[in-house]
Each structure stands twice: as C-alpha cells, then as structure tokens.
Amino acid sequence: MTEQTTSAPDTADSSKEPGFRIQRIYLKDLSLEQPNAPQILLVAAEPQVEVEVDVAVTRLSDEIFEVALIATVTVKVESKVLFLVEAKQAGIFEFNNIPPEQIDPMLGIACPTILYPYLRSNIADTISRAGFQPIHLNEINFHGMYEHRIMRAAQVAAESDSADESKIILPH
C-alpha cells in the first residue's frame, strides 16, 4: 500500500498564485433629505437631476483594501432642492500576489465596477421609498474615470514641481 502526500513545493507554488477576492460588499452610508417638503411637493415643474460619483480607497492591510463608491443625487425644482440622496456603497477586496502596478488600476476600475450595481439599486430603492419615481443611474466608464484621475494627478504634480523650484528641500 502506498501513501500519496502533497509535497511542500506544490503547496508553495499554489500560495504564490495571484488571487483577487471579494471579502464583503456592504452599504456603508445612506441618507435622504427633503429640505423643502411639503411645499415643494406641490410645485408642478420639470425637475433637474444632478449626479456626482466618486471613488475612495482605504488600505486596511498589505493585501486588503476598502473601496467605496460615493454618490450624491440632487433633484431640484425651480432651483429649490426637491430631494437629495447621498450613498456610500463599499466593499472589502483582497489582493494576493498581484504586482503593485496592477493593484491600483484594479482598485480604480474593477472594484468600482463590481460595486456600482449595488449602489444604483440602493439609490433607486431609496428614491422610490421616498415617494418619487426611481432614478436609475446611467452606466459609468470607470476606466475613463480612472484615466482622467491619473492624468489630473500628473498635471497637479507637474504644477507643484515648477512651484517648488524656489524652495529648499532638505534630505530625509
């Protein structure tokens, strides 16, 4: 009778494989305001909708990050706020053996893409429960948003480098 065991090199090789895992997706914050109710509810005019979306990343450990999608939906009637919804949909993501240069794009593109359907659903549900027709947010190109953020950061860095030329920088 022969015994089969896994050798140590096989186990070590599998632990070095790149891995991406969603640990948790959750609604971190949600608020609804109707500051001009009930008077504004009687105004019969076409509402204007403004939507702002941002991404925030927090490192929890070497391999674990929290990514939060933050959205603000403001609906106005005749320049007065009808309602305002602020939501923060978050997720905890684990990156194992992924090169550092690949983690940043994943945090800025892949993770928000995973979170966005949850955010859209929570916002539409909240608006509906407040007594209004739900607003279904349009799809977002997170890749384009990420590229724009990188380009803007490079511009800011270039501007600060030229402004710092007159300063004395001491070695650390």
Image (spheres, grey):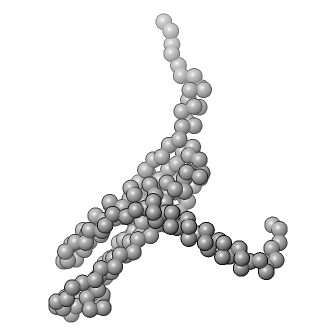
Question: How far across and how far down the image is residue 48, in percent?
Answer: 28, 83
Q: Is residue 47 visible?
A: yes
Say how many tags the image has.
0
Quick one: 119 or 164, which is closer to the camera?
Answer: 164
Task: Kindly identify the residue that appears in the image at 25 percent across and 88 percent down.
Answer: 77
Q: Residue at x 61, y 72 (%)?
A: 155
Considering depth in this image, is 55 or 131 the residue closer to the camera? 55
Instruction: Find residue 169 and report its horizontal and vertical position in percent.
Output: 80, 73
Rendering coords of residue 50 (x, y %): 34, 79
**Image quadrant where residue 153 sits:** bottom right
Say above or below: 120 vs 92: below
| 155 horizontally vs 119: left or right | right
In the rendered view, would you say 115 is above or below 133? above
Quadrant of the image containing the C terminus:
bottom right
Up the image or down, 96 lies above or below 88; here it is above
Residue 140, by quadrant, is: bottom left
Q: Quadrant of residue 167?
A: bottom right
